[in-house]
């Protein structure tokens, strides 16, 4: 199957643009937070079982395979999209951990570095498309920018979560509560201060990563590290169950399937 041209729209038979990402609903945020937790513990489990480098190669291969399928798909498919998000979560965690564990770079430095990288991706996306809206992912080029942004937010969120829990010595559970409070800020700023909807979305999206990961780490790490000691493998499997159930529901119900635009030229976010 041939890939569409970089700027080409994903369309149905009538020529209407088709979105490749889900509608932002409560289902979206629930699955997103669960995948961040699973990605954190699954990454740690694989790294300890296989070693950082083999685990990283396996994570990269899985991510690449799912993104190829995602890009080849003509429309949003819940099982495919969320499987790709899970692998982004796993590999994004590995990327941040490799920078710290293998390269020896402090989380303070890597958090700043990933922040700069994210700002660069968003700047390039806006310069090219004049929008950063998740509702505008209707061309291959925008989809490339979208997934580059998503991957960078996962790496940044991992670094920030480890920074608060480890470097700043807050611990995993207090870090989870901290990010639970912080994630309310974009909502409040949107409602009371008129924050742009796109900015509010991406701010909340970034914060879901350390939020889910902090609570997952708290469940998985030993009591000596301030956790419940359930183990990263069992926690990963425990999180997989509700993820699979929710995605299965979305696949059948189409509750988060984007509405098709009324006109072929409807591309704005």
Image (cartoon, grey):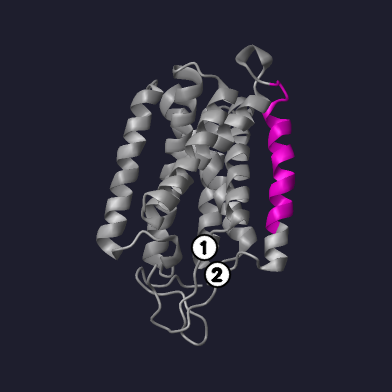
| Image quadrant in which the C terminus is located | bottom left
Circle 1 SS class:
loop
In the rendered image, the residue lying farthest to the top is 224
Residue 258, numbered circle: 2
Residue 264 rendering spot, x and y as whole percentages: 42, 83
161 or 97, which lies in front? 161
The CA span between labels 2 and 1 is: 7 Å
Circle 2 SS class:
loop
Residue 21, numbered circle: 1
Residue 77 rendering spot, x and y as whole percentages: 60, 65
Start-end of magenta stretch: 228-247
Looking at the image, residue 4 lies above or below residue 90? below
Residue at image point 40% right, 59% down: 144
Residue 224 rendering spot, x and y as whole percentages: 64, 12
Judge whether residue 62 can be spotted in this image.
no
Contact between marks 2 and 1 (CB within 8 A): the answer is: yes
192 or 169, which lies in front? 192
269 or 71, which lies in front? 269
Earlier in the chain: of badge 2 and badge 1, it is 1
Judge whether residue 233 can be spotted in this image.
yes
The overriding secondary structure of the stretch rendered in magenta is helix
């Amino acid at each position: 199957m041939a890939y569409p041209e970089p700027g080409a729209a994903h369309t149905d038979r009538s020529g209407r643009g088709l979105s490749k990402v889900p509608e932002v609903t409560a289902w979206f945020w629930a699955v997103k937070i669960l995948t961040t937790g699973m990605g954190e513990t699954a990454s740690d489990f694989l790294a300890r079982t296989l070693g950082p480098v083999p685990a990283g190669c396996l994570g990269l291969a899985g991510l690449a395979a799912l993104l190829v399928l995602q890009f080849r798909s003509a429309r949003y498919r819940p099982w495919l999209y969320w499987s790709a998000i899970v692998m982004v979560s796993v590999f994004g965690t590995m990327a941040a951990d490799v920078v710290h564990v293998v390269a020896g770079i402090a989380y303070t430095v890597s958090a700043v570095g990933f922040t700069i990288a994210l700002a660069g991706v968003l700047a390039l996306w806006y310069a090219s498309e004049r929008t950063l809206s998740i509702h505008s992912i209707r061309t291959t080029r925008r989809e490339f920018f979208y997934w580059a942004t998503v991957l960078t937010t996962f790496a940044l969120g991992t670094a920030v979560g480890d920074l608060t829990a480890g470097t700043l010595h807050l611990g995993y559970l207090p870090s989870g509560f901290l990010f639970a409070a912080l994630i309310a800020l974009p909502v409040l700023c949107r409602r009371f201060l008129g924050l742009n909807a796109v900015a509010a979305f991406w701010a909340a999206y970034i914060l879901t990563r350390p939020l889910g990961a902090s609570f997952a780490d708290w469940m998985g790490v030993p009591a000596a590290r301030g956790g419940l000691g359930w183990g990263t493998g069992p926690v990963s499997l425990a999180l997989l169950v509700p993820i699979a159930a929710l995605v299965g529901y979305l696949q059948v119900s189409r509750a988060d399937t984007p509405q098709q635009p009324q006109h072929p030229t409807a591309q704005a976010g």
